[in-house]
Amino acid sequence: MNRGRSSSSLRIVVTGLIAQYPLGGVAWDYLQYPLGFARAGHDVYYLEDTGQWPYHPDADGVGKTCDLNVRYLADLMERFGLGDRWAYCFPWQDQWFGMPEQRRREVVATADLILNISGTLRRPERLDRRGTLVYLDSDPVFTQVKLARGQTDFRAAVDAHDCHFSFGECLPGDAPDSGHAWLPTRQPVLLDEWVHDLDDDGRYTTVMNWTSYREIEFEGRRYGQKDGELRRHLDLPSRTSVPLELALASGKTARAPVDLLRHRGWSVVDPAVVCPDPDSYRTYIQRSRAEWSVAKHGYVIGRTGWFSCRSACYLAAGRPVVVEDTGFGSVLPTGAGLLVFDDLDSAVAAIDAVEADYPRHRRAAREIAEEYFAAEAVLGSLVSRALEGSA
């Protein structure tokens, strides 16, 4: 391990899915990490090597080339000052784009910290590195279930890391014990990127997938997706006067019942139309009156305190957030700006509370973002604990 540098100035490599999924929300999920590190004065690079064929929005999900994905990533990196600090691997014959090979290998080998967000890095155990390798679990409960089920390849990849962080800030909660010491962390937000003077258009919105993957079972317990949770709240539009809109992507394992949702009073729009890129995604959030959203069923029953990257951005935009409870009330303040529900009645009550004093809830939302999600604080804590934990 490299212990030569202080935590005030480090060479940091960040992984992610920006090119893999060239979508507005995904970009912000991962982009705020390298940008946050760079603004803190670190020597930062972005590396994407998932081993997966990239998503293409205009080719039924999978493209035959990576031209669009590479261009998308290159433009974003250039826009934010990282134009010569990225590398992307297309799995067909391991074709690399971005930094020259010698430079890429040198950066990885000399990095003080490699942050593997969402476990996206292919073959982490084979990295030629001397620095600290960090696993960041953005899918708590599901990650722990896979490990507890004995998925050997997955466990080997997770075990290859020097320390482990999770968005499940209350782990283990009701999730299986994976045998790892999961350190709590949350989404870093570049607060100045979300400041605006736009009026809201009256809608409570969210951006979501109907399903992300199939539900899983462990020891007789089912861990499901958002589809089941939204079905439990289908009648919400009939119980409130505020417009409710879902920017809804059809599920990867089950098609969203758009006609049914609209019949029940939901407005359903296509995220590929209303918020396909980082700018339109940000504007969509900023022009919303508030967020209303369910969580994955697994997060709800797991009670690990998972909190959405997207919801953190609503808060930073000064938009109140009304979301299904996953146990995060023990680490984040709720009741003003951020409200929780666990059934239809409490969802109605939360919306009513926001509408009863909207200016107060809007101020509180931004204050929560400033105190709990500011990139400099979130990333500073992550780095110091990662280096301390691997010493």
Image (cartoon, rainbow, N blue to C red):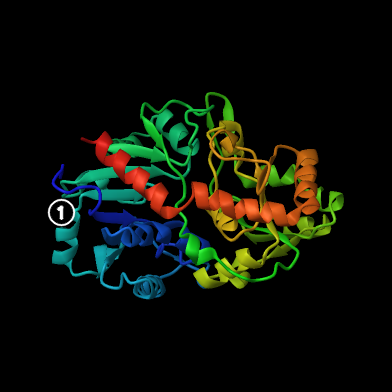
Residue 220 at x, y percent in the picture = 57, 25
Total number of numbered discs in the rendering: 1
Side of 295 relative to 126 (left or right): right
Residue 209 placement, left or right of 11: right
Position of residue 234 relative to residue 74, above or below, is above
Q: Nearer the viewer, residue 20 or 283?
A: 283
In which quadrant is the N terminus drawn? top left
For image coordinates 38% across by 58% down, the residue present is 36
Q: Is residue 230 left or right of residue 183?
A: right
Amino acid on which the number 1 mark rests in the picture: Thr
| Most foreground residue, 7 or 99 | 7
Image quadrant containing the C terminus? top left
Where residue 273 appears, as percent x and y from the top left, is 61, 72
The residue carrying mark 1 is 110
Q: Is residue 27 above or below residue 175?
A: below
Q: Could you tell me which residue is drawn at 77 percent across and 39 percent down? A: 346
Crowd around label 1: few <14 · some 14–19 · many ≥20 (10 Å): some
The residue shown at (68%, 59%) is 205
x then y, percent, for residue 136? 38, 44
Callout 1 secondary element: helix
- Which image quadrant is residue 335 in? top right
| Residue at left offset 27%, top offset 61% | 45
> Is residue 277 visible from the viewing direction of this image?
no
Q: Residue 348: x, y in percent? A: 80, 45
Residue 264 visible: yes
Q: In the image, 378: left or right of 219?
A: left
